[in-house]
């Protein structure tokens, strides 16, 4: 029942509304009994008894009651909708905030399509349950009780004989409920699979075309669709098998009413009017019984869905501000120190005892073979992961003692894997601060050598680019990402292989521009080209989790790896190689 | 489906006999104190219910099957169509918006589709049968009951219009919300880097509020129909009493009057049901419109009627005065002509945005040519089926998308029936085997769509292996090695040098070392071939290429 508590918790602020709505539901359900009672009087007194003058007032009263009841119903719907939407908003708010602050390890495990299933399909069930199922059940319960009370007043014997059906119904429902639970979990899982497959297909549409794998993708998707279809049909069949039993139990009531009621009339214990009331109210007994079994069905769906939502609702990032975190006052200088840092991905060690310091305003370059952990250094610096051992200091304070906001505000990264948002180019460059002046945004584009091609676009900076910047060439995307990082004007600027797809000439221009930035910053440059790194104050060569530090000259003389790269790239004017560590 | 319909009709007809039985009991058996007849009538009543519910359940099963099959078909159609849509379709909208159409919307139409039609027919039949029974019982009272119908239709008509509009707005806001959520998940890292959570949150909440506003409007309209119907029902019921007791006083038996009021209530059930179906139908239509919009999206690149497969592609490529524009009037390629022989390697160089990628995109026919003609093996490119064309080309794109699954599965994407040995060989050729074998589960290591702990360079290497395993006649490498370090790249070049033999290749790269080794170098500028020749020829020419090379060395 923690699922219910979860809903109640998130209703905070509108709980009164929900309760009010449910009370209205109960109230309007009681009213349902009034009209059949009036019909009884109508038939007994006005029609059979000949008191025709009662007819019209009674009928008007009944119409008035229906009107009042329906007006109250509508008010109830409003209350239910308002409170359930409030609930949705609260859950979405938490989940979205959570996702936004979630650490990278979380996303390494969960697929986008899966999250989407939770915030769409699953959340819809929670809404459906809160806004609809709750009041349907209150309706049923109240209707049932009031019908029993009303009928009890008229004739106890007949009422009790009708109630004998109830225990049977409960047994049937409980058996069914057990059976259907795994079926709904299955449906949910299959739906999530469809989402994942479709989402990846959309993201990877270019790869699909490139390999002419359309048929294969269709096949894959069809399989997932089919599995979902089968699971749905299975659940539906399970339901259809139980429906006739429940229906029949419900209709038993009419049978009992007619048979027992008939005998009672014949024995003179009740009037024909009484029987009319009984037959008129059998639905008020049978419908709730039927609804009760529907509830079991919906409840199972609700549980399956809520479980999945709760999973991401409470998934708190391990990387978060400590309660005693230091809040920086003013702009940091951008000094970075790695002190005996160890880090591994699962069983794979990435960094082993890495130490270095970058002073404010310095430029440090990082080189190394593919997959050696260059990007990991950047990820650690921005605290996307926590170190396993040692520490990283930003302006002399351990990252874990700083607030994430301070760290991220101080380090602007132009990532290797460029992600742009479907927004205007302007909006993408000014991402760090949407309110930045137009001129500053354009200046940054110019520094990143992006101004040229942007201006040539028909709508210039207002051109809307698609997700992941598709439609732009690799080099263009990289330059927009670079402009975005520069525009943040952070004390540390990190270029993670940001110019790999940019042509030589533009690249050397960008390099010159980086010396003319209108603000002070420490630069961390990851690159493959010697030309990009050789002017750096320090060059770090990262290999097999260990580092070698030096300048172009010292490394060219002593570092095998660096020397080799220099030679591959035909770098001129190399000093003589003195041999040394790899 | 037909069986379902027949069963439903039978069930409905049988269920309708209940009130007649009740009337006969009240007017006959009870006053006559005939307990035997009463028992018979009661049992008959139970029997009718039993039969009709069993029929109903069978029908339910049939419809569940039919409905789910329909959903399956629609989903498959949308998905299949998406596979044929041009890149521009994907490039011009957030991917979340496409996703909701394939999954959410299709799910939403399922109920109406599976039950809507049959239910409509049944309810209509119900109405007809009830009307029939009513007329048989008392024609005058039946007419009174029918008088409520036009009023109801009028009301529904009025609400309908508002509802359509509300549905449209809601769908729009709903898809905006999903799209933003989707994009935010994909872009979490960038958001965190720039500490933008607060602004994003504000945007998200704004989208949420817009969603809510449209939702409320829609929900209230939907919930208006029920109460209105109920009010009309009560008025009609009252009229029946008034008519039975006052207008036609004396001529209506009490049994008939009670029977008629039962029918009046019953008559209203299918009408209420129809009103609900109609309600759902409106919602469904609005979803279907979106779905069909996607299906109707024009396919720009497809096989022409006379397209034939081109088995055993040799790999000669010829551009004959080719011009191309993505947008009307903006020429990206301008009168480009060249021809490449089987086995030749061509490097495309030039400033970013000059049209290099466009040339390779045209060779793989990702776009249709605006003017001129592209020939593959001397066959106009449109005359070759896309499947045959692309399956014999190895196209490695800048964006190395990795699917969730094992590394082996990702490589196998290039050749679905590749053996483990072939996968290992391809990985070895592109120097990916070293890091793959170091991973905890080797080739069976599971990665997800964002590549998880793989570095960008490693992703490129896997994508490279994926291309290699497909054994293409023409190889296209568009910045394929940009994130790979120089040392690995050199090893890689030695590895693929053998692979390149006998295959035509087009290489877009910025690294001189890669470019130099190609047979032919084309310098592309402003959509034209500015220079073309071997490295030595172009160096001797001291033109743009020469300038490019010297920049790299001096830098």
Image: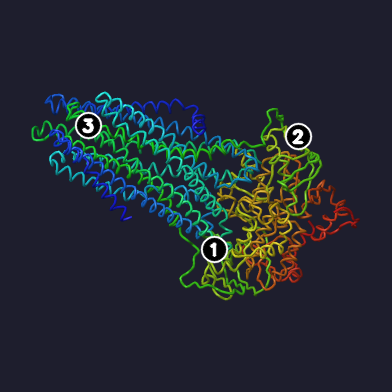
Q: Is residue A55 left or right of residue B312?
A: left
Q: How many marks?
A: 3
Please tell me whether residue B240 is drawn above or below residue A462 in the rendered image.
Answer: above
The tag on residue A398 is 2
* Residue A216, percent from left and from top: 54, 61
The tag on residue A261 is 3
Q: Nearer the viewer, residue B23 or A97?
A: B23
Marked residue chain, label 2: A
Element marked by disc 2: strand
Please tell me whether residue B275 is drawn above or below residue A72 in the rendered image.
Answer: below
For the view shown, which residue lies furthest in the front direction? B36
Kindly tell me whether residue B34 is visible in this rendering: yes
Marked residue chain, label 3: A
Label 2, label 1: how far apart the Cα atoms are? 53 Å
* Residue A510, percent from left and from top: 72, 51
Kindly tell me whether residue A436 is visible in this rendering: no
Element marked by disc 1: loop
Element marked by disc 3: helix
Label 2, label 3: how far apart the Cα atoms are? 84 Å
Q: Nearer the viewer, residue A496 or A274?
A: A274
Q: Nearer the viewer, residue A147 or B71?
A: A147
Q: Nearer the viewer, residue B84 or A424?
A: B84
User: Around disc 2, counting alpha carbons within 10 Å, would you say few (fewer than 14), some (14 to 19), or many (20 or more)?
Assistant: some
Label 1, on which residue? B367
Marks 1 and 3: CB-CB under 8 Å?
A: no
């Amino acid at each position: 029942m923690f699922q219910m508590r979860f809903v109640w918790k998130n209703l905070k602020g509108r709980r009164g509304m929900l309760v009010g709505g449910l009370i209205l539901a109960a109230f309007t359900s009681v009213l349902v009994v009034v009209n059949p009672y009036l019909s009884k009087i109508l038939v007994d007194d006005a029609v059979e008894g000949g008191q025709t003058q009662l007819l019209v007032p009674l009928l008007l009263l009944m119409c008035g009651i229906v009107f009042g009841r329906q007006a109250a119903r509508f008010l109830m719907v409003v209350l239910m909708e308002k409170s359930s939407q409030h609930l949705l908003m609260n859950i979405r708010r938490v989940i979205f905030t959570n996702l936004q602050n979630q650490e990278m390890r979380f996303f390494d495990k969960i697929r986008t399509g899966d999250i989407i299933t939770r915030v769409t399909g699953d959340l819809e069930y929670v809404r459906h349950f809160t806004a609809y199922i709750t009041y349907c059940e209150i309706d049923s319960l109240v209707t049932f009780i009031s019908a029993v009370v009303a009928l009890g007043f008229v004739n106890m014997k007949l009422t009790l004989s009708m109630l004998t059906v109830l225990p049977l119904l409960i047994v049937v429902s409980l058996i069914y409920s057990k059976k259907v639970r795994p079926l709904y979990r299955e449906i949910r899982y299959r739906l999530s699979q469809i989402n994942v497959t479709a989402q990846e297909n959309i993201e990877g549409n270019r790869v699909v075309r490139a390999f002419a794998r359309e048929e294969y993708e269709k096949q894959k998707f069809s399989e997932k669709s089919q599995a979902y279809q089968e699971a749905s049909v299975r659940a539906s069949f399970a339901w259809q098998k139980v429906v006739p039993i429940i229906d029949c139990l419900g209709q038993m009531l009419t049978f009992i009413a007619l048979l027992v009621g008939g005998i009672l009339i014949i024995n003179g214990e009740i009037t024909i009017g009484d029987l009319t009331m009984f037959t008129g109210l059998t639905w008020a007994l049978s419908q709730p019984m039927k609804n009760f079994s529907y509830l079991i069905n919906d409840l199972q769906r609700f549980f399956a869905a809520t479980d999945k939502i709760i999973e991401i609702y409470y998934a708190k990032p391990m990387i978060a501000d400590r309660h005693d975190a230091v809040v920086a006052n003013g702009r940091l200088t951008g000094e970075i120190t790695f002190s005996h840092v160890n880090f591994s991905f699962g069983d794979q060690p990435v960094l082993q005892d890495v130490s270095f310091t970058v002073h404010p305003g310095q430029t440090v370059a990082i080189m190394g073979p593919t997959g050696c952990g260059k990007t990991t250094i950047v990820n650690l610096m921005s605290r996307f992961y926590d170190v396993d051992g040692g520490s990283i200091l930003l302006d002399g304070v351990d990252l874990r003692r700083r607030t994430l906001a301070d760290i991220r505000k101080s380090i602007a990264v132009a990532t290797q894997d460029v992600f742009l948002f479907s927004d205007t180019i302007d909006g993408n460059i000014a991402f760090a601060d949407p309110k930045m002046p137009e001129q500053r945004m354009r200046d940054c584009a110019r520094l990143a050598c992006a101004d040229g091609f942007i201006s040539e676009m028909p709508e210039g900076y207002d051109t809307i680019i698609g997700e992941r910047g598709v439609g732009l060439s690799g080099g263009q995307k990289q330059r927009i990402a670079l402009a975005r990082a520069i525009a943040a004007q952070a004390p540390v600027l990190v270029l993670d292989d940001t110019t790999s797809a940019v042509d030589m000439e533009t690249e050397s221009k960008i390099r010159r521009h980086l010396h003319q930035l209108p603000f002070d910053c420490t630069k961390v440059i990851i690159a493959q080209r010697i030309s990009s790194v050789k002017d750096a104050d320090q060059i770090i060569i990262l290999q097999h989790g260990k580092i070698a530090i030096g300048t172009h000259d010292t490394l060219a003389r002593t570092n095998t790896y660096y020397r080799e790269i220099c030679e591959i790239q035909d770098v001129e004017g190399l000093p003589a190689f003195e041999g040394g560590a790899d | 489906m037909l069986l379902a319909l027949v069963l439903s009709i039978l069930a409905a007809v049988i269920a309708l006999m209940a009130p007649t039985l009740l009337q006969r009991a009240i007017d006959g058996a009870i006053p006559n104190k005939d307990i035997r007849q009463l028992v018979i009538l009661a049992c008959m009543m139970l029997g009718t219910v039993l039969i009709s519910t069993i029929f109903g359940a069978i029908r339910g099963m049939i419809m569940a099957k039919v409905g789910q099959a329909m959903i399956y078909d629609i989903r498959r159609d949308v998905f299949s169509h998406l596979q044929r849509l041009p890149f521009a379709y994907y490039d011009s909208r957030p991917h979340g918006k496409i996703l909701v159409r394939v999954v959410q919307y299709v799910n939403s139409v399922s109920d109406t589709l599976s039950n809507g039609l049959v239910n409509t027919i049944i309810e209509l039949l119900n109405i007809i049968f009830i009307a029939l029974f009513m007329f048989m019982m008392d024609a005058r009272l039946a007419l009174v009951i029918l008088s409520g119908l036009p009023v109801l239709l009028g009301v529904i008509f009025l609400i309908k219009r508002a509802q359509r509009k509300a549905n449209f707005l809601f769908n729009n806001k709903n898809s905006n919300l999903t799209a933003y959520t989707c994009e935010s998940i994909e872009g979490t890292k960038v958001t965190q880097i720039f500490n933008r959570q607060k602004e994003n949150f504000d945007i998200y909440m704004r989208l949420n509020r817009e969603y809510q506003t449209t939702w409320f409007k829609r929900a209230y309209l939907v919930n208006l129909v029920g109460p209105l119907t109920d009010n009309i029902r009560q008025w009609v019921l009252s009229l029946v009493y008034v008519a039975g007791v006052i207008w036609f006083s004396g001529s209506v038996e009490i049994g008939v009057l009670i029977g008629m009021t039962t029918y009046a209530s019953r008559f209203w059930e299918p009408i209420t049901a129809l009103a609900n179906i109609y309600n759902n139908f409106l919602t469904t239509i609005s979803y279907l419109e979106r779905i069909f919009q996607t299906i109707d999206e024009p396919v720009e690149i497809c096989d022409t009627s006379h397209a034939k497969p081109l088995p055993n592609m040799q790999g000669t490529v010829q551009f004959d005065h080719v011009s191309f524009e993505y947008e009307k009037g903006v020429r990206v390629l301008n009168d480009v002509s060249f021809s490449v022989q089987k086995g030749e390697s061509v490097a495309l160089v030039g400033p970013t945005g000059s049209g290099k990628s466009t040339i390779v995109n045209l060779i793989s026919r990702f776009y249709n040519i605006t003017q001129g003609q592209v020939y593959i093996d001397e066959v106009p490119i449109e005359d070759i089926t896309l499947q045959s064309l692309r399956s014999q080309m190895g196209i490695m794109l800048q964006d190395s998308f990795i699917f969730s699954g094992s590394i082996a599965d990702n490589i196998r994407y290039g050749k679905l029936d590749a053996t483990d040995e072939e996968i290992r060989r391809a990985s070895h050729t592109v120097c990916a085997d070293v890091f793959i074998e170091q991973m905890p589960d080797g080739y069976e290591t599971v990665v997800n769509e964002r590549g998880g702990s793989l570095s960008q360079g490693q992703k490129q290497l896997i994508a490279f292996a994926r291309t290699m395993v497909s054994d293409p006649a023409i190889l296209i490498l568009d910045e394929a090695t940009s994130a790979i370090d120089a040392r690995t790249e050199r090893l890689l070049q030695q590895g693929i040098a053998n692979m390149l033999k006998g295959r035509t290749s087009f290489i877009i790269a910025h690294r001189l070392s890669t470019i130099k080794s190609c047979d032919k170098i084309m310098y592309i500028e402003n959509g034209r071939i500015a220079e073309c020749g071997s490295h030595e020829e172009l160096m001797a020419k001291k033109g743009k290429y020469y300038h490019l090379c010297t920049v790299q060395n001096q830098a």
